[in-house]
Amino acid sequence: MNLAELALPPGVLAHQHADAGAQAEAMALQVAEALRQAIEVRGEALLVVSGGRSPMAFFECLARQTLDWSKVSVSLADERWVPQDHPDSNEALVRRHLLQANAASARMLGLYHPAADVERAAERAEQALAGLPLIDVLVLGMGEDGHTASLFPGSPHLAEALHEDCPRRVLAMQAPVEPRQRLSLTRRVLAGARLPMLAIQGQSKLETLKRALAEDGLDLPIRAFLRAPLQIHYCP
């Protein structure tokens, strides 16, 4: 099975790449051009990315792109509730692999805040992002369980986070693996991105995407984002 065999909703564009390197390079070129256009129109740009190991090659390709990075703010779709010096920190990963080379002058807007518990940390992140503009470019990933960002199936706040009218920007979430305590932007914020992109690799994730396109319900949270103007980038 390949991406072209899936019945995608109208306006959702599919890009299939030969391998992970080609996927990273193509995505970096597209994201860089979208950021340049945002800077030209609005004088600044907001890029929101996901963490984990999968996007590291993309981050490094993007960091080599030439644009006015001093006018770009970078934030996260989700974060593990761990300090920035922790090996599981998404912010630390972005700083190591994206905010380097040409992109070193970009501004980082992290989600982690120390607090008594993750619920209070989410409230602090909410306050810190109160003036966040619309996202110019959003790059999401997807797990084999259908989660995206830290919107995991079965998480206590999932229904609230996926509600189109959720008043919150950030909610505490629970992952099925360590570190379990997470912070995630909500659907309302993520779905407002001018250019949303979904990067997936491997047949198992393609099977998950196929199921998400064919069914309804909260068991595969990625469903909430499978609508135009989404661009899907896949490599086997």
Image (cartoon, rainbow, N blue to C red):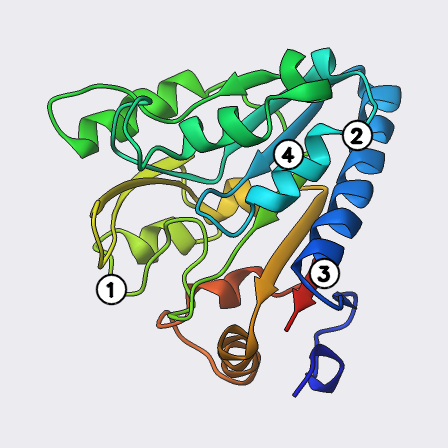
Mark 4 or mark 3, which has the lower sequence index?
A: 4
Task: Indicate the quadrant containing the N terminus: top left, top right, bottom left or bottom right.
Answer: bottom right
Q: Please name the residue that numbered disc 2 is placed on.
A: 65
Mark 1 or mark 4, which has the lower sequence index?
A: 4
Residue 96 in view here: yes
On residue 135, the disc is: 4
In the picture shown, does residue 8 fall above or below 46?
Answer: below
Residue at x 31% of width, y 65% of height? 153
Which picture quadrant has residue 163?
bottom left
Mark 2 or mark 1, which has the lower sequence index?
A: 2
**Gap in Å between the C-alphas at discs 2 and 4?**
19 Å
**Relative to 233, 128 lies left or right:** left
Q: Please name the residue that numbered disc 3 is placed on.
A: 228
**Gap in Å between the C-alphas at discs 1 and 3?**
26 Å
On residue 24, the disc is: none
State the image coordinates of residue 98 (x, y, percent, origin top left): 60, 29
